[in-house]
Image: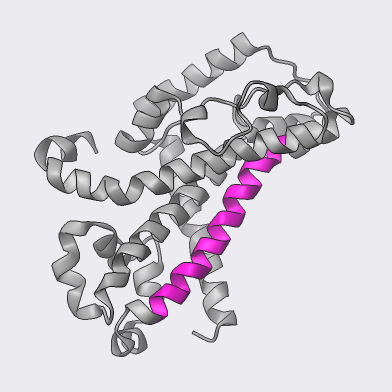
Amino acid sequence: MIQWLQEDPWGFLQFMLYRAPGVLMAIVIHEYAHGYVAYRCGDNTAKYMGRLSLNPLKHLDPLGTAALFLLGFGWAKPVPVNPANFRRGKRDDLFVSLAGVTVNFAAFLLTTMLTVLVGRFLYNPDFIRLAGIESMLGFNQQGFILQLYPQFAGDIAPLLARPWLLHAQRLLLHFCMMNLGLALFNLLPIPPLDGFHVLNDTLLRGRIVMGGRTFRLMQAALIVIMLSTDVVSKFIGGAIYWVQEAVLSGMLFVLGM
């Protein structure tokens, strides 16, 4: 991403005009879900601190947001939660931990359906009959890559029946991809991610107790690992392709496409 920005700033800006709304919305609904479920479970910390909001400025971490755009991964300011206020202890902590990934995955499912419906009008029917709509919607397909990047608009123009719909489809595809990536990444059982809380609340029965300082150190360690190796990114990338292909195939089968 950084090299692309240096070599083709205009192309990078065009791409980000579509990517930015998807990134911001995926982060906002993730953090809002944590705060809302915590509030319903008896903890009003997020509400008291003004974090029970859909305003992106309330949730964005400047460095984490920049990393998400430039490096492909990032983080938001965690919604403050006080488990001591929960009515039912570990059960409520589990619900709060799962809230963000659940909302992101639900958004991914809904957006996948919308991309299929938009695709029925966007793509040339003859092309769809020949290559299948999954050739344009599968995350690991060349058609998906070509339509995601504005600089390839001329290359895919012959495949489009209604080119004006491509703008809406790009926004949907970015939102779809960001929600799935955010959900799967946060399910990793590594502090301070949501998956660690789920593991601790279920299999470990809350035996591991970490303070805020420890979580910040673990977050810094995770960032270093992701900057210095591609182990996590390769694993998440493979999982994203597998899940999206399974969901898309299932939806197309149900819709008779």
Q: Is residue 107 magenta?
A: yes
158 relative to 170 in the view: left or right? left
Percent across and percent down for residue 197 are 70, 30
Instruction: Indicate the quadrant containing the N terminus: top left, top right, bottom left or bottom right.
Output: top left
Confirm whether residue 137 shows in the render: yes
Q: Main secondary structure of the magenta part?
A: helix
Residue ID at (20%, 44%): 12
Residue ID at (10%, 39%): 7
Q: Is residue 99 magenta?
A: yes
Q: Which residues are magenta?
A: 96-120
73 relative to 13 in the view: left or right? right
Residue ID at (81%, 25%): 206
Residue 151 position by quadrant: bottom left
Confirm whether residue 202 shows in the render: no
- Depth order, front residue of 32/123: 32
Residue 256 position by quadrant: bottom right
- Depth order, front residue of 202/110: 110
